[in-house]
Image (cartoon, grey):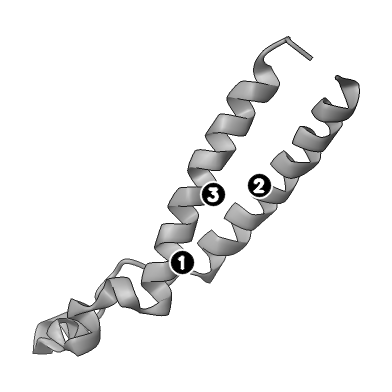
Amino acid sequence: MAALRVILTVLFIIVCLAIVVLVLMQEGKSSGLGALSGAAESYWGKNKARTMQGMLVKLTKIFCVLFMVLAIVLNMNIF
């Protein structure tokens, strides 16, 4: 059981580092001056889920859920 706890702890650290990297890779939410001229409603603005930014948001959500699950499992004193 001690080996399983070590494996989960290492996985938890990797997930923590991945979340930090994913958050730092994302762009800011501010529209900037482009929103004044309507540039935010371009083709890329409408299909944001298919872009690299959309993929980063999805991966961040997945890793955050994994983070929470691992934190709960590691906090249980069954190991």
Query: Quarter of the image containing the C terminus?
Result: top right
Task: Quote the CA–CA distance across marks 2 and 3.
Answer: 8 Å
Above or below 11: residue 39: below
Three-letter code for the amino acid on which mark 2 is drawn: Cys
Q: Residue at x 81, y 26 (%)?
A: 5
Quick one: SS at disc 1?
Answer: helix
* Mark 2 or 3, nearer chain start: 2
Three-letter code for the amino acid on which mark 3 is drawn: Phe
Q: Nearer the viewer, mark 2 or mark 3?
A: 3
Three-letter code for the amino acid on which mark 1 is drawn: Leu
Q: Which residue is mark 2?
A: 16
* Mark 2 or 1, nearer chain start: 2
Q: Which residue is mark 3?
A: 63
Q: Which residue is mark 1?
A: 56
Category of crowding for the residue at label 1, using alpha-carbon neighbours closer than 10 angstroms: few (below 14), some (14–19), many (at least 20): some
Task: Quote the CA–CA distance across marks 3 and 1.
Answer: 10 Å
Quick one: SS at disc 3?
Answer: helix
Category of crowding for the residue at label 2, using alpha-carbon neighbours closer than 10 angstroms: few (below 14), some (14–19), many (at least 20): some
Q: Residue at x 53, y 70 (%)?
A: 25
